[in-house]
Amino acid sequence: MIKIIITSLALLMILNNKAFAYLDPGTGSIILQALLGAIAAGATWCSMYWQKIKNFFNKKDKKEDIEKNS
């Protein structure tokens, strides 16, 4: 199986054609929007889990305060 994959990759590298592609100015804008969206999604994900971690430790502090005051 691994020989087939290696052979396929070697053939793809050897027998490739030149692509005469054109990137218009709008393509850069789309790439920038995707990058900024990914950064925003990552920041949101991190902040949600950071809030869960903070709440976990604050619950312990609140329980200790309640036990001390009782």
Image (cartoon, rainbow, N blue to C red):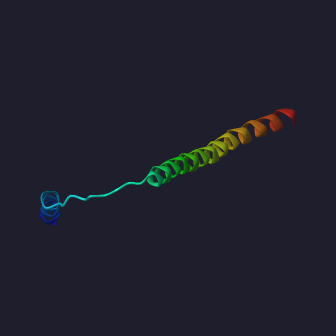
**Relative to 1, residue 53 above or below:** above
Image-based side of 42 in relation to 69, left or right: left
Outermost residue toward the right in this view: 70
Image quadrant occupied by the C terminus:
top right
The residue most toward the top is: 68
Position of residue 40 measured from the top left corner of the image (x, y, whole percent): 58, 47
Q: Which is nearer the eye, 23 or 58? A: 23
Image point (34%, 56%), residue name: 22
Q: Which residue is pictured at 46% across the width and 51% down the height?
A: 31
Q: Residue 28 placed where, x, y %? A: 45, 49
Q: Quadrant of the N terminus?
A: bottom left
In this rendered view, identify the residue nearer to me: 46 or 40: 40
How many circles with numbers are drawn on the protein? 0
Q: For this view, does 27 lie left or right of residue 39?
A: left
Q: Residue at x 18, y 61 (%)?
A: 17
Q: Residue 65: which quarter of the image?
A: top right
- Of 19 and 34, nearer the camera is 19
Q: Considering depth in this image, is 70 or 42 the residue closer to the camera?
A: 42
Residue 42: x and y in percent read: 55, 47
Q: Position of residue 57 (x, y in %)?
A: 68, 39
